[in-house]
Image: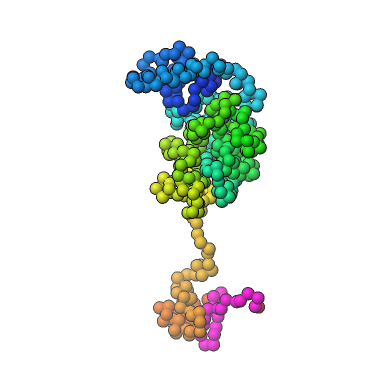
Amino acid sequence: MTVSDDERFARATLCYIAEPCDRLLGRMIQRFGAVGALDAVRAGKAPPGLFSGEPERRRLAEHMDRWRVRLPSADPEADLTVCAKLDGRMICPGEPEWPTQLDALGDRAPYALWLRGPADLRYACLRSIAMVGARAATSYGNRVAADMGAELADRGCTIVSGGALGIDAAAHRGALAAGGATVAVLANGVDRLYPPRNEGLLTEIARTSLLVSEWPPGTTPTRLRFLVRNRVIAALTKGTVVVEADLRSGALNTAKFARELNRPVMAVPGPVTSLVSRGCHRWLRDGVATCVSNAAEVMDTVGRIGDDLAPEPRGPVMPRDDLEPVTRLVLEAVPARGSAGPAQIAVRAGVDIGTARSRLGLLAAAGFIERRGQGWRLPRPRRKGRP
């Protein structure tokens, strides 16, 4: 589908004058298209028949007043030019690169997306995982996020996160270290690399993968914008992994959006004494999130049925585990101290003397027992340093 220039300029203008996730504007765009919605804003009058309730009409009038104040300073052509100079682009719903999973947001869907980087957003997000967590992450959390990001990238997954300090940055770095793709969804324009401490990381993501934003170039981040962009992180991906999060955090905000969209939510448990894992533990306790500890368990939760099953966790396999049941009964009857004859062992094992003798011979040949005088016993463990 080809988007007309009028539609493109209208969406670029709406990105400038209105904050994302405005459901009133989203409903207007769904009903009348971006051009029709922008014409209504210019006229200062909502199209007839859109809202039947007086409260909604009043709210829309208030929003329109705010949008019209910003309208004279909107310059969509300049914004598109700045983005192009950064080797970026703006994509609109219906274009080949637009991820169709964003349509699940309904009237909260982005008006458009501003991209910077060589990767194709739609293709990159076909098999993608969101990894989010605390900015004030512990060394444990950073290690888990980096390792899991690298392992998922090795399995062909794109890691999507917010480019913030802490868990976000660790997940991005893990994916890059494995030579995989990673997408940073920003709360500011793609021309601003925020936070400054992650400038090198974000530059590398822009060079090899993709920076994504709902705001045009020049936009600065705010606390509310961080929360709003979290719905895009959740909607782009197959599932969300929370590595570390306190009871009140932006990471849990992302997970809540994922739940609303019926996408799997996973949490990594931390030390029970860790404050930054209290949110993860609460969600695990309440059954809201699935417990995961490695990439295999993540893929088992969100991957393709039959292809991405995690191996069943097992303890160490002991040599005696492979013995057949009767032989194991005879082995259990052999004493560790002193010794016992075949008749005693047969009684203890509950088998006849012939069976006991034959099994004792097999166990001795395999090194499970040793002869002591006229009886049998378990071998004593050798001390270190002694032949």
Taking the view exactly as shown, the residue that stands out farthest to the top is 43
Residue 333 shows in the view: yes
Which residue appears at 47% of the width and 73% of the height?
Answer: 328
The residue at the point 57 percent across, 76 percent down is 381
The quadrant in which residue 183 appears is top right
> Between residues 360 and 295, which one lies in front from this camera angle?
295
Closer-to-camera residue (157/214) = 214
Residue ranking furthest to the bottom: 374
Look at 50% across and 47% down and name the residue there: 276
- Which residue lies most toward the left here? 53
Front residue of 28/226: it is: 226
Q: Residue at x 52, y 43 (%)?
A: 133
Q: Is residue 46 above or below residue 231?
A: above
Question: Does 41 sit above or below residue 232?
Answer: above
Main secondary-structure element of the magenta-colored stretch: loop
Magenta residue check for 376: yes
Chain part drawn in magenta: 365-386
Residue 54 locus on image (x, y percent): 33, 19
Image position, residue 149 (x, y; %): 57, 44
Q: Is residue 209 visible?
A: no
> Residue 205 in the image: x percent, y percent?
63, 36
Residue 287: percent from the left, percent from the top? Answer: 40, 47
Q: Nearer the viewer, residue 357 or 211?
A: 211
61 part of magenta stretch: no
Horizontal side, residue 255 vs residue 73: left or right = left
Position of the C terminus by quadrant: bottom right
Color scheme of the displayed model = rainbow
| Left or right: 32 as drawn, with respect to 13 | left
